[in-house]
Image (cartoon, helix red, strand yellow):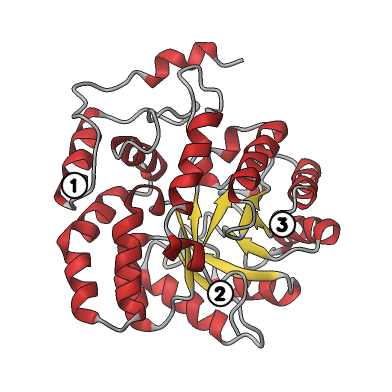
Amino acid sequence: MLTIADRCYVAVLLPLTESLKIDEAAYRSFIRYFLRDPRFVQTGGLCINPEAGQIFYLTRAEKRRVLEIAMEETQGKVPIFAGTWALTTEETVETARDVKALHADGIFVTPPGGAQDVTSCWDADNYPEVWGDQIKAQDRVVNLPIITHPVSGSAPPFSPGLPVKAALQLCQDIPNIAGWKMTYGLYEGFRIVAKGLRSLDRHVAILGALASRFHEYNATGYFDGTLSGFWNFAFEPMLDHLEAWRRRDLEAACRIWNGGLVQLHEYIADMGRLHVRYQTATWLRGLIPNPFMRPPMPRPRQIEIDTIYELLKNLGLSVIDRPDAVIDVSATAASVK
């Protein structure tokens, strides 16, 4: 049975002004961009305040304001999940309360940040409660559907996603988990976790994240929807590609995929530069005014700007006038209060 998680969710990025404040006008315009396509309204959704939306560098008040804007613009046209990450569990729970108060459809949960015990050295298989307790604390106060962002410091083949044992334990312990974002860099890890999710006694949506693999994932049947930042800059051809798969028109799907889409996605999908490249590509499309991100997120390099620009053009997507130099994002850092 399909659930609210079985849709294509955009991990919506956040445009900033030159002084690194939230650019509310640009954000409203960006939200409307997705809502103009009736195909997306029928099958898609928005994830507000995800990792791609710089959630780690927003205050609780800013996260609430970003969600308010999204709720005002969507007016219920598509479902909305909202990120709750904060540095402490207490604030994470309070942020989840904000999501509930603003009538979003669900919460998007990310593992804790902080000491190595709960980040890079966390043994998720043996100590799933490190994240599980925090999810349960949110679940108790909001009782909403949950989509996970299961990043961890686990070893291959699961890195950078959560190992299968821990993943299945959390799904069994927390019935409100409706979707599992597949944050797995290696296909073998993806396959193991996907098979594990299919073995559960209830449906948990397998949500593709790394768009450079969407073609293969559709061929396997382990693809119930997506939650991905790649939608921000390649929205139209990605919709066309998934529609071709839904029609089982393999010829059309391959033509779109090999016509520049996979080349763009493979370049963007450098995990150490992923969000920088999301922001840069979306700016080059003319969908946001600039590629600014809050430090410590780095600025794009000129080679990245040039490469992404050509890949977007080769795919036939509209782009801004060619930029001649890197915008010095770091120069604006001093203005952040």
Q: Dividing the image into 4 quarters, which one contains the N terminus?
A: bottom right
The image position of residue 238, as x and y in percent, is 33, 61
What element does badge 2 sit on?
A: strand
Where 289 sits versus 40, above or below? above
Q: Which mark is residue 205?
A: 2
Where 46 sits versus 147, above or below? above
Q: Which residue is mark 1?
A: 311
Q: Quadrant of residue 178?
A: bottom right
What's the distance in space between the residues labelled 1 and 2, CA to CA? 31 Å
Left or right, residue 117 beside residue 221: right
Q: Quadrant of residue 172?
A: bottom right
Point 30% across, 48% down: residue: 268
The image position of residue 126, as x and y in percent, is 66, 67
What's the distance in space between the residues labelled 3 and 2, CA to CA? 23 Å
Of residues 14 and 239, the one drawn nearer to the viewer in this rendering: 239
- Of mark 3 and mark 2, the one earlier in the sequence is 3
Extreme-right residue of the structure:
141
Number of disc labels: 3
Amino acid of disc 3: Val
Q: Is residue 8 visible?
A: no
Q: Which residue is mark 3?
A: 130
Of residues 105 and 278, the one drawn nearer to the viewer in this rendering: 105
Q: Which mark is residue 285?
A: none
Point 36% across, 55% down: residue: 235
The image position of residue 283, as x and y in percent, is 34, 35
